[in-house]
């Protein structure tokens, strides 16, 4: 159950089903979809002479070439295609849509194909964005597809786009799952109902009633607002949080003295051995891994440069142009890790993260409050990092009698933090406060869970910066071990009353299961890492987990999405 292979299957068919030299036309949304799963050189090897946008009106007429189109079935793309067919620039057109096509759209295209240039129309179900083999998303950004209408309700456009992304994924994987949703989430229920209706309406595509071997669990971000607020320390997560990963690319053009070839770098597991091996390493192990890699190349140059730091490695790369050519991907990772190291130091993220982890994992109000007051008053800490820590405090100690959230908001304002940023404390509480959440994520709402939390803290951890485990991962681990079956059954009801219980009493755990977890409100790279750990741990039980969401969040994008919505 591999999202990357599913999308690449269709990409390869788009490039190879039509023989000979050809042009590939894409729209605004399919362009990044293709770039995430293929490369220009791969397409060229399949005789794709040119890749262009359908809405580019300055394209040259080349009637001797065939044209392959891969488009989303939207009104805008259909109209652009109609305009193209009225004045065709190429000889023959082979048109592939990324999702189910309405009959009216086919009729409109037929009416306007007066020159009979269209040779083929097909549906290739790749209407989702692939971040890695086990992570996909619907590409909902606040600027283009606002998630919320008002409060905890769907924006109709976002709901429709999410249904399309999920349905395409299921068709690509050839699955018709049992749908379960978090009981306290009206948005999860609505998404499940819309998807269930579509599968029933398009039964010829999706097949018969669900097989028990595939589960689709629709979760709501409001039940775990903590994970997207934390600083995470694995490579892929740090790149996304600190530098930004947009459609598999990292922009380094703003970095001082960056070389021309690393102003924009591409991250792809299937083409980058170092990234595939290092994406889930924590920052400390990452430096060791990179040093070993650079050492292996240094030995080939018979150089004796000291490589004790990231700065040493950057100087070595600069001094040996042949190393850059030989190592390929490694030199770009030297640049990436060097910039991450600079940001961590400049923003004092070690101190910030230590407090974040304490607030997320441990119940020690007086100690946390004292540390938080000092951090808010520290001029060297960025305003957004101060606000994130205050939000974590407000969430954890929301029902504590000595709660000092009001005082901390005043302290933020007195330290010059923008009023709109300070207001995010109340926005997140309205979105995901204790009355909105389904589970006791802080384990502090009754005497039994408080005791469990205390003992959890006494056990110690390997790293104070990585103590937190996403709620999604804890829930999946319980499910796969066959623990708390009745509770999970209650929290994750099925839309199908005929479905078997999620975990029957007395079972040793789930086996022979494909599980698709989809988070309304976005997923994080740390949850991707947690799912990878679970996939490795339970591979012997023949369990495969695929993670998806409406988007992939950094702390900034999470707060930005909430800031655009009124939560009464």
Image: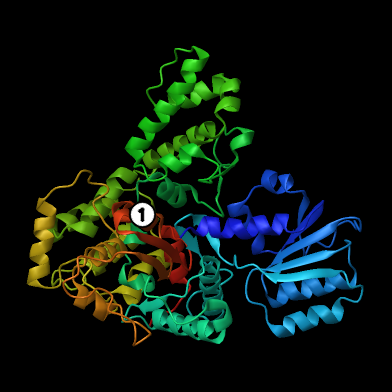
Q: Position of residue 349 (x, y in %)?
A: 34, 45
- Count of numbered circles on the image: 1
Q: Is residue 402 left or right of residue 153?
A: left
Residue 33 shows in the view: no
Q: Is residue 112 left or right of residue 403?
A: right
Q: Is residue 506 left or right of residue 426?
A: left
Above or below for 309 versus 382: above
Q: Position of residue 495 (x, y in %)?
A: 38, 84
- In the picture, the quarter occupied by the C terminus is bottom left
Q: Is residue 245 left or right of residue 356?
A: right
- In the picture, the quarter occupied by the N terminus is bottom left
Per the image, label 1 sits on a secondary structure element best described as: helix
Above or below for 551 versus 203: above
Q: Nearer the viewer, residue 149 or 221?
A: 221
Q: Quadrant of residue 320?
A: top right
Q: Position of residue 362 (x, y in %)?
A: 17, 57
Quickly name the residue at label 1: 385
Q: Position of residue 199 (x, y in %)?
A: 51, 81
Q: Nearer the viewer, residue 484 or 429?
A: 484
User: Looking at the image, which residue is at 47% across and 41% down?
Assistant: 275
Q: Residues within 10 Å of mark 1 (few under 14, many from 20)?
A: many
């Amino acid at each position: 159950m591999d999202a990357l292979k599913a999308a690449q299957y269709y990409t390869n068919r788009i490039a190879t089903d039509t023989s000979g030299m050809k042009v590939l036309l894409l729209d605004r949304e399919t362009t990044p979809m293709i770039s995430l799963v293929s490369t220009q050189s791969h397409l060229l090897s399949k005789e794709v002479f040119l890749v262009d946008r359908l809405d580019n009106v300055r394209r040259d007429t080349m009637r001797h070439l065939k044209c392959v189109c891969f488009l989303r079935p939207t009104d805008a793309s259909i109209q652009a295609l109609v305009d193209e067919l009225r004045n065709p620039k190429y000889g023959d057109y082979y048109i592939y849509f990324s999702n189910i096509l309405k009959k009216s759209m086919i009729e409109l295209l037929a009416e306007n194909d007066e020159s009979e240039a269209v040779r083929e129309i097909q549906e290739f179900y790749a209407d989702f964005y692939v971040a890695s083999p086990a992570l996909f998303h619907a590409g909902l950004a606040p600027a283009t597809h606002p998630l919320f209408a008002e409060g905890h309700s769907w924006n109709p456009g976002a709901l429709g786009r999410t249904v399309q992304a999920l349905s395409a994924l299921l068709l690509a994987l050839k699955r018709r799952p049992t749908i379960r949703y978090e009981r306290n989430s009206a948005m999860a229920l609505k998404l499940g109902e819309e998807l269930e209706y579509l599968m029933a309406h398009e039964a010829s595509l999706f097949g018969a009633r669900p097989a028990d071997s595939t589960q689709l669990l629709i979760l709501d971000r409001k039940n775990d607002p903590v994970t997207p607020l934390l600083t995470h320390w694995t490579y892929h997560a740090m790149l996304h949080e600190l530098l930004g990963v947009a459609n598999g690319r990292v922009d380094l053009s703003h970095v001082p003295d960056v070389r021309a070839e690393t102003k924009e770098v591409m991250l792809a597991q299937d083409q980058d051995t170092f990234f595939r091996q290092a994406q889930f390493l924590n920052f400390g192990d990452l430096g060791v891994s990179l040093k070993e890699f650079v050492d292996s190349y240094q030995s080939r140059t018979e150089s004796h440069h000291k490589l004790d730091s990231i700065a040493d490695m950057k100087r070595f790369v600069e001094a040996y142009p042949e190393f850059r050519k030989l190592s390929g991907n490694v030199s770009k990772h030297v640049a990436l890790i060097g910039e991450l190291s600079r940001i961590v130091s400049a923003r004092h993220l070690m101190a910030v993260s230590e407090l974040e982890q304490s607030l997320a994992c441990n119940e020690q109000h007086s100690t946390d409050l004292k540390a938080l007051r000092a951090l808010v008053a520290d001029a060297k800490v960025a305003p957004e990092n101060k606000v994130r820590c205050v939000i974590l405090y407000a969430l954890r100690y929301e029902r504590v009698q000595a709660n000092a959230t009001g005082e901390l908001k005043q302290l933020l304002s007195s330290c010059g933090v923008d009023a709109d940023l300070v207001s995010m404390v109340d926005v997140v509480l309205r979105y995901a406060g204790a009355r909105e959440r389904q589970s006791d994520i802080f384990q502090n709402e009754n005497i039994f869970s408080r005791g469990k939390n205390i003992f959890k803290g006494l056990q110690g951890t390997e790293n104070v910066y990585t103590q937190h485990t996403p709620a999604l991962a804890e829930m999946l681990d319980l499910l796969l071990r066959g623990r708390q079956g009745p509770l999970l059954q209650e929290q994750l009801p099925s839309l199908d009353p005929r479905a078997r219980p999620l975990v029957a009493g007395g079972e040793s755990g789930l086996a022979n299961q494909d599980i698709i977890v989809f988070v309304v409100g976005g997923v994080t790279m740390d949850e991707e890492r947690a799912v990878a750990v679970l996939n490795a741990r339970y591979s012997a039980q023949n369990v495969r987990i695929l993670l998806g969401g409406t988007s992939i969040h950094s702390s900034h994008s999470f707060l930005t999405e909430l800031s655009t919505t009124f939560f009464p």
